[in-house]
Image (tube, helix red, strand yellow):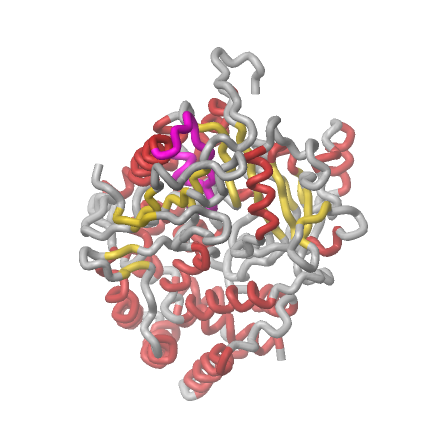
Amino acid sequence: MKKIISLLLSLTLAALMLAPAFAAETQPYEPNGVSPTIYVLGFGSYIYDEDGNKVGPVDTPEGYLSDAVKDCIGAFAKAYLTGSEEDLEAYKEKLLSWVAPLYEDLLMGKDGYQQDNYHIWWQMPDKETNKKSGGTYPLRGYVFTYDWRLSPYDTAEKLARYVDIVLEATGAERVNLIGRCEGSCHVMTYLAVYGHDKVNKVLFHNPSCEGYLLTSGLFSGKLHFDATEIDRWLENNEGVFDMPEGEIFEMIKETLDLFATMPGIDPSGLLLDDVYQKVLYPVLPDVLLATYATYPGMWAMVSDENFDDAISYVFSGREEEYAGLIERVTAYHDEVQTQIEEIIGEATDDGVQAGVMTKYGYPSVPIFEDSTELSDGFTKLTYSSLGATTSTHTGTLDEDYIALQEGAGLGKYISPDKKVDASTCILRDTTWIVGGLIHNDFPDSMETLAQTFLTSPVPMTVDLDPRYPQFMLPNGNFELVPMTEENASKSTVGQELEVDFSDSLHAVIARVRAFIEGFIRSLRELISGIVGHAKGTADPVTDPEPTTEPEPAP
């Protein structure tokens, strides 16, 4: 049964496509949490129009799924069977007729700049209430929200203003910065452009500044449909189709029924990669440009190894038309993404404490060429750890490699499950890696780790606090415990992991369904992985009551 489901799921996905210790001037270190923390969240902050109506992220209308399937499947099948340019164009127009209207009001200009008057809401710190409590500032006392469409340069300029607002309100001399997922791109750009004189500590939480599996794969066109890998993915996700009203099964059944009525199509023998190359690959750039490919913020999460291919793929034949956008996204790639090690090095040389918190252990949706690599379901650990060397999801590091590292005195950086070598990380002594978690799981225990790092009276490393070694796992209560040889088998889903992942699995399947709903809603959901935290409201129990208002004009 699973093999049949995996093939049908593959078909449906395809069909709709949709350093040195001698720094010149080391800034003083602020202990005990005396610096306020600005928390820069990931993708998904709400965007509002001039009248205060939410316009983004886009909400797909009810009934879109079944209507899109029924309307697009015929044109798709004809384009695949005939291979004619005329039928391919007809399928593309049919697909765009569903996708483009949802996003036309949110498109950026072809020069890469905002062309509307939409805005987000800021948490504005109040001078009277936003002070320390018990000697420390709360982790989420100052949540910075941003328009995720914009270039990291535009967002960094706004972040610089927000840093000044927080410093004025609190009377502090420096702030701590947390950049989570896409937020890491904007924090890194802030450090690159505005420096680190106003920064005490910086923490990257599941950063995507070195790349994100999904944006990298989609923008470069490197999709790969493997029914065997999808079957393995399903095998690791027992019960994931127990969705309300059986929506996934209904969708698959509808699609199968439609396929079955079309002469010449045999779903059981359809070659998915052939489908992709013939029908989807030539259509995807137009779909991207009708949606997310005009957003410099999304381009910031295309990995260096895929960037040139992505530019060529998306803009082929349109280089002059989109010259401004290409220039903007290339500037970020050249000046920030490929300079991350230097940007961090300059900050740490001057006394800024920098760290990384990330996770792995969940297979990514198997529609990309590198989906077998170790990840948290959405981001490769190599990216989110800023440089770790990893095995595949189901494998381990080569024994000869491990022996070589141990002989070089680097054995302590090898994870107990033999899947990760943290010695190659940019911040190898301040990188904490948690196995057994999906990207959009942000348990309180990880936020406690973040606060411990930010409030430590001495520079914290993976060797300082026995509660927080380099490699950890969540226990049944999602509390972090050290990873050991005894519990290491629980680091990846599918290896008798005892943590209950039912909520996370439903979130993943919701994203798969969204992908089928028109490709583009999926991109938003897949890129985010954290939409549940997108709005960035304060925790009423631990955080001060914020005031919110539209972001101030420059």
> Along the line of sight, which residue is nearer the eye, 246 or 111?
246
Residue found at x 52% / y 56%: 440
User: Residue placed at 56% from the left, 32% from the top?
Assistant: 426
Quadrant in the picture for residue 129: top left
Give the residue displayed 52% in from the left and 43% down from the top: 205
Q: Position of residue 493 (x, y in %)?
A: 66, 60
Examine the structure image and report whether residue 257 is included in the region drawn in magenta.
Answer: no
Whether residue 330 is visible: no
Observer-nearest of 465 and 354: 465
The correct choice, above or below, for 285 with respect to 418 in the image is below
x and y, in percent, of residue 156 in the image: 34, 36
Residue nearest the observer in this picture, 377 or 216: 377
Farthest residue to the right: give it.
486
Q: Is residue 216 left or right of residue 152?
A: right
Residue at the far bottom in the pictured view: 261
The residue nearer to you, when weighing 345 against 32, is 32
Q: Is residue 194 visible?
A: yes
Q: Which residues are magenta?
A: 169-189
